[in-house]
Image: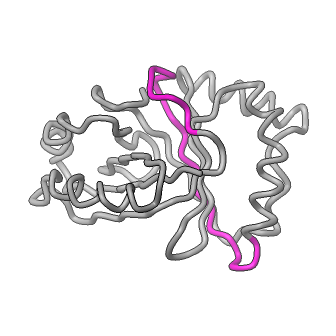
Amino acid sequence: MSYAETVFLDVQVGHVPQVVSALSGLEGVGAWVTEIGRLNRITLLRTAETYAELLEGRPEVLASLPHEHLVRVDVTSWRVVTPVAEPGIYGGVYEWRCYEAMPDGMAGLEERFLAAVPERTGLSSLTCTLVSLEGIPRFAHLWPYVDLNQRAEVRSAAVATGIWPPKVASFLTRMENEILVPLPGSAWR
């Protein structure tokens, strides 16, 4: 089993370039800026084989942040439920989807989602699927696309064939979606 951590950085308006510059030294970390969704936000993703390893690396990442330009830092640890794609070049945009689940709904949500993934990944690749380890029960997935046109085409085909979305609505209380653009030094771009 592996683990992941997201660090959402809400940046002071007008200071995204300074934060991007400060993050350029991070290695092995996914880094994206939100294009559609919560603006002035940067998303970081890193992985580890063990939860202890994940927690050990957290102080170094948090210490590297330019706190003078940040208004909020939100850190979440996740259990990885689908294999994480190897770092590399996958597309110009990524779609982050995060669902809040009913406290007793995570098992059913995970089961139904994972049952639908094989057919859905036949249409486009999946970077990762995650289940939160703390806070509100959350389920998230990250998809790379060449561009927004490919995203629209793939999602339309998935819905038209009935393979997507998975039948998980009864387990959800809230859904969020953001379109992310990878930063130049991102491990996934």
Position of the C terminus by quadrant? top left
Residue drawn where x is 29% and y is 63% of the image: 73
Q: Which residues are magenta?
A: 84-105
> Which of the pair 111/69 is nearer the observer?
111
> Which of the pair 94/185 is nearer the observer?
185
Q: Is residue 157 left or right of residue 40?
A: right
Q: Is residue 119 left or right of residue 146?
A: right
Q: Is residue 11 left or right of residue 110?
A: left
Residue drawn where x is 50% and y is 76% of the image: 135
Residue drawn where x is 35% and y is 62% of the image: 55
Image spot of residue 10 (x, y percent): 29, 58
Image spot of residue 61 (x, y percent): 24, 52
* Quarter of the figure with residue 125: top right
Q: Residue furthest bottom?
A: 103
Measured along the vertical axis of the image, is residue 144 above or below residue 178?
A: above
In reply to whether residue 88 is colored magenta, the answer given is yes
Residue drawn where x is 53% and y is 23% of the image: 147
Q: Is residue 71 left or right of residue 125?
A: left
Image spot of residue 109 (x, y percent): 77, 62
Measured along the vertical axis of the image, is residue 95 above or below residue 134?
A: above
In reply to whether residue 146 is colored magenta, the answer given is no
